Amino acid sequence: MRMFPCLVSLLALAGSLLGGGAALLGHSAKAGTRAIVNTSPEPFSNMAVSSVEDGVTFAGLGLALAYPGVALVVAVALIAICALIGVASWRLIARARRWIAPGGKTSP
């Protein structure tokens, strides 16, 4: 790679952007889930969600250490699923706004 320092810089930039995007997506999903769960009055759902989060984190770390290729495929699949859920949610919100607005037009 000594002959192509620009390529190394571009690969580093691409890796940084992909890693940062994945971290942002993961944090947003966790924060959104937390916001929904914290509205429930009983403490059991909060404890259950925390336990599931800890278990998934521990299992994901073990998978990444034992089988990094499989962990990469699982991570990419989860990111794709989150992106699809985000698009579907956006469309659902837009449809609800059109349904609620008088005359079928949304206000800006």
Image (spheres, rainbow, N blue to C red):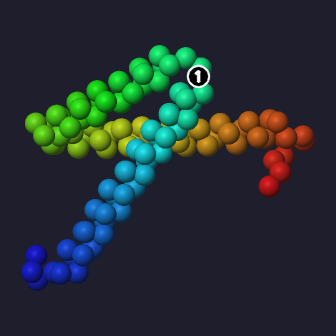
State the SS at label 1.
loop
Q: Is residue 20 left or right of residue 44?
A: left
Q: Is residue 2 left or right of residue 53?
A: left
- Tell me what residue is drawn at x 70 percent, y 42 percent: 94
87 to 44, vertically: above or below: below
33 to 24, vertically: above or below: above
**Residue 14 in picture, x, y percent from top left:** 31, 65
**Residue 80 in picture, x, y percent from top left:** 40, 42
**Residue 15 in picture, x, y percent from top left:** 28, 62
Residue labelled with disc 1: 40
- Tell me what residue is drawn at x 81 percent, y 47 percent: 106
Q: Residues within 10 Å of mark 1 (few under 14, many from 20)?
A: few
**Residue 61 in picture, x, y percent from top left:** 20, 37
- Residue 70 seen in render: no
Q: Is residue 13 left or right of residue 34?
A: left
Quadrant of image for the C terminus: bottom right
- Tell me what residue is drawn at x 65 percent, y 36 percent: 92
